[in-house]
Amino acid sequence: MTPAVIDDTTLYAVLAPFAAAVVAPFLTRLLKHNAAWPLALVPALIFLHFVGFIEPVSRGETFVAAKAWAPSYGINFSVYVDGLSTLFGLLISGIGTFIILYAGGYLKGHPQQGRFFSFLFMFMGAMLGLVLGNNLISLFIFWELTSITSFLLIGFDHLRAASRRAAIQALVVTGGGGLALLAGFILIISATGEIEMSVLLGSPDIIKDSGLYLPIFLLVLGGAFTKSAQFPFHFWLPNAMEAPTPVSAYLHSATMVKAGVYMLMRMHPLLGDTVLWTTVLPLFGGVTLLVGTILAVRQTDLKLMLAYTTVASLGLLVMLTGTSHEKALEGAVLYLLAHSLFKGALFMVAGTIDHEAGTRDVTKLGGLRKAMPVTFVAACLAALSMAGLPPFIGFIAKEVLYYGTWGWLELGLPITITAVVGNSLMLVIAAAVAIKPFFGPKVETPKHAHEGPVLLFAGPVVLALTGLFLAFIAHTTGILFVGPTLSSLLGTFTEVDLHLWPTKINAPLILSVITIGLGIFLFTQLDRLREIIASILKSIGWGPDQGFDQFVSGIVRFATWLTRLVQTGKMQTYMLLTFFFTALAVLLPGYLTNSFPAMPKLPEHRFYEWGILLIAVLGLFAILVARTRLTAIVSLGVQGFAVALIFMMFGAPDLSFTQFMVETLSVVILALVMTRLNLSPRDHRTVPARLLAGVVAVAVGLGLGLTLLSITQQPFDSTLSVFFTEFSRSIAHGRNIVNVILVDFRGFDTLGEIAVVVLAGLCVLALIRVRTKPDTVLDPPPERTGQSQNAEAR
Amino acid sequence: MITTPIAAGDWLIVAPSLITMLGGALCLMLRKHTDLQPKLGITLLGALVLASFALLVRVLDHGVITMVMGNWLPPFGIAVTADTLGATLTFIGSVVAFCAGVFGMKTVSNSGRRYGFYPFLLLLMTGVCGSFLTADIFNLYVWFEVLLISSYGLLILGNDRIQLDGAVKYGVLNLVGTNLFLIATGLLYGIFGTLNMADIAIKVAELENPASGTLATVAALYFLAFAMKAAAFPVNFWLPASYHTPNIVVSAVFAGLLTKVGVYALIRIFVLILPASLGYMADIFGLVAIVTLMTGALGALAQTEIRRLLGYLVIAGIGSMLAGVAVASNSEVATLAISGAIFYAVHSIIVMTALYMSAGIMNMMGGSYNLRKLGGLYQKSIAFAGVFLILAFAVSGLPPFSGFWPKIMLVDAAFKDDRFWLGAAILVSGFLTTLAMGRIWIFAFWRGGPEGTPDGQSVEVSGSSQSDLASGAIWLPLGILTALVVYFGIQPEWMIELSTQGASSVVDPFGYIRSVFGEQG
């Protein structure tokens, strides 16, 4: 079905948050934290805009809108609205509304609250642009913008080294993956000639048939896996918890980290359902699920527990997407919806507890249910959904996904077992998050805990209730949200029939019971479990997180080594290498084309002509063997004079005169300079070094000579000299052709050369007049260590 | 034969050379009036910006335009020809020079003014603009010389020991490069008997065996000479040896302009004149591009001195542009590749100049160029931090700033030419650049103070010249350049169009040749 073209409102919906980002700091200065209320209207209105799409999209319609951006290069700012992008659009704007409110309460009184709002809005716009992106390049731009804004938000608390490290780590991992994705996109564009996603989706086999499927698949995966924190790239996400909690709730659980999953789902019709897809994705997804849940159990920090289960959930989503099995994909869509709601709520709960009680370590919390009743209720509702218990959307998701994995023929059993283990551990964490802080005896906390303001509890309550509500209207949820999204994944219109309560006892229900039973058992053993995992991890003693540090310091060390190697700071080395490459340039082409000139027939020279030639050659030889620098300079002069004599004998007296002048002056000046420099008169290079330099020098000379020889053996096109000879008198009115060339035919060159002479004079003046300052830089200050060779020019 | 008088508008072709040369002479005569120098210099540079913009507009309206010196018609006299490539680079170069002139009001001392900062800067622009606009290969050499000697003058202003050390390495190595250029030009004249680029292009196209040994040697020499000028690996020693030594505004101009003239010459010579040579040298170009990209980015990672770090990023950028030239050997994607290289050159001119200026401001605010000693700049000025972050993302090629578009054009072209390693190298180099810039950001900006500041705390850092920070002369140029970076990032259409047009004028030289030789050519 070809997408219908709609007006530009949706484009403005994507750009609206950027406008809000500009306004936010000013509004915050004016209204303080209450600026959250008017600001939250922006995502709320965007949400309403997307609500308008729900109904037509559920009928299988799709929409596009576009504006030319860089038409010379085929780049549009364009959006594609279908089930998948509508679902994401609703989640981003809907959760975003409450995140803005929550941020208003959470960072109340923070001096940089306005900036924080600004970053959040920029992220929101980027995320909307990403999930709606139709043009691959503009989609990628928004993809990178989410990484950039995430970087700024993780490092928001920038004075702490941990925040800075986490920020740069996230940027490196997701940015690096972004480059892979970009390469993949450009390959797609090169291979198919199409740049709009909607067009690509119209012919699903276009990439599989292009012959570049494998590299495209790997590159897209590189982008998706890093963004969605799949093992072994999962480590950045828990570290990103350094960010203020609104960021963790929004970016690092509900939306941004799902961008990778989004990309896989979006690309599923194009890249999915191949052997590669159904092998690689379930494998990495499954490992990520297990690693995530196991690591979550070890944590005692509420945010970190949630973060690792986010990693696990992303693994689950990738695993399900990787099956390419319709029912499992349906489970993935449902779980995605459920997860965004309960995880967003739980993160905000964790933040509220931290904010009001002063700690988020579960071992230091307890009995808060009386002090924080509203938060408590929200936490329970969200945790029940996370645990996959009825009557919550999480339960339906789990049922459907078990149905899918159980029914998947290829690798159904291992996948199902992985899912059961993962889900039961997820239940453990859900229980720990909801029970530990709120039940039991009241524990003394750093701050006197009491209920947070409405700004803080509005979000968790609404999101948790939505999870409940969507489950009660399960059938409608299926028709309005799950079905259309599943249609996008499958590439064909598909309807979904959901029920809250299972109609019969079947495998999924039994699996659910097993999951719950296992979960409850493990929860009772939580402390022991934690110890076991901790000791296992201790015995491994290495993780990708350390690996990241080793990777970065490895690169830096390698870079330092390489730079020292090539940039030695020694002029001799630089010159030797330069002339070595010159020798290559003049000798290699002749050698490769086998076109060295034939030895010319020697003309009948007179004996004194031979003599002068001999002197020139002797002069050169003397330079090579000269012991002292002065001898070398004088020998060079001897060779120069010999050449000047040759010029004179062969009819170029003016050239000869110039050469005499230059040679005389350069020998005199060089000799004078030598007396002023504190150089030792002798050349201290070792014999091999001198030999090498000599060989390179001779090679350069030989190569240039040979080239000149072969050029002179070809006929010369003398149009120019004939013209100059003919017209320098008649038109240019000058007898001396050389002079006419200098001042008339090519007077423009001479103008430039005059400028050179003037400038050279000015340089000399500056060098002589301005006193050389004392060695403030070269003379090393005492703290100079191995690292600070900075003072010397290298 | 052109018998009609030159159209008044076409005089714009020599306007950049005239303004800077006469203006430079004027500045030189008044060099003792140190208070007058900036006013005069900046006015002249402003006039240069206007003239080069007018020239660009004229080229866009009328196509390639030519003016022949002394009316000695080509190939006998010297032709000066403005096509979109030359005019675009002239304009952008002029803007950067103007910004540097303004920035220099604060950073160049009275003695620096007296000993020729503004004359040198103006004549540097004579060389730069002359190179971009000449259609004569020997004349190009002359402008290279003007450029070299005036840059040398700028380099030694101040006369620190370290500057002289850098200047010797810069001077000698560049002189070798310039000499190779001269030798190659002599040999080329020996082969074709002409110096006019359009004329050579015609004669090369008529050659029976364009891969002959002698022409290949000449091509190899040109490649080596311009690669040295462009600071491509492995002949880039001079750049890291010298760019961190002079006055920061001089570093800024150098980083923006000098190496790009080398790249420009490579494009002009190899794409316009010697396309056949480029054909069989493409793999070498590609290899040099890859190692330049990698060593540049890795070199940046190894540095803790910001100016050195930026110097290596200049080199990495050269790798990207060389990649474009390598891919241009494939005629199907040549226009895309060269337009990517041109856009990249424009981006790099602006962003590198702005980054060096930022480094200068970091020193003014934080008292050092060393990442170990810097810190706390985020709190000192959020606006400056924002500007720096924009420039950092731009130089790393991240969207939505100016570095992103040329990067995708170049990677796209490389992939279409099946040079996957080349495309990958551009991306990886961008990645390493992100890491290098990220280090500056987290240390100099986010960390509360110099290395060793207690975690979670901030300390007051003292700058080297706080008073200068109040001056608009510091912020205006940086603001202009950053605005361009953002503009080319968010509205890339104009620059993509310019670079595509510039690329087609060298890839398909018909218009260029016709302009030089008049209608009958």
Image (cartoon, coloured by chain):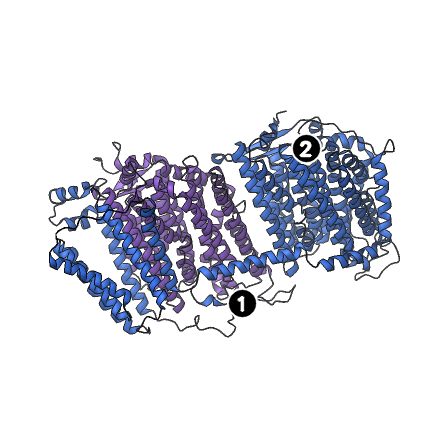
Q: Is mark 1 on a helix, strand or loop?
A: loop
Q: For the residues marked 1 and 2, what is the alpha-carbon distance in whole angstroms? A: 58 Å
Residue at horizontal 50 percent and vertical 67 percent from the top: A788
Asked if residue B167 can be seen in this view, the reply is no
Counting labels gives: 2
Looking at the picture, how far across and down is residue A753, in whole percent?
25, 54
Residue at horizontal 77 percent and vertical 42 percent from the top: A419
Looking at the picture, how far across and down is residue B272, in whole percent?
34, 40
The crowd level at tag 2 (other Cα within 10 Å; few <14, some 14-19, many 20+) is many
| Mark linked to residue A270 | none
Residue toward you, B100 or B197: B197
Q: Which residue lies furthest to the top in this view?
A: A1
Q: What residue type is labelled 2?
A: Leu
Residue at horizontal 81 percent and vertical 51 percent from the top: A433
| Mark linked to residue B462 | 1
Residue at horizontal 23 percent and vertical 46 percent from the top: A598
Quick one: quadrant of the C terminus of chain A? bottom left
- Chain letter of mark 2 equals A
Q: Which amino acid does label 1 sit on?
A: Ser
Shown in blue, the chain is A
Shown in purple, the chain is B
* Placement of A510 over or under B433, stated as above or below: above
- Chain letter of mark 1 equals B
**Which residue carries the number 2 mark?**
A489
Pointer 1 and pointer 2 on the same chain: no
- Closest to the camera, between mark 1 and mark 2, is 2
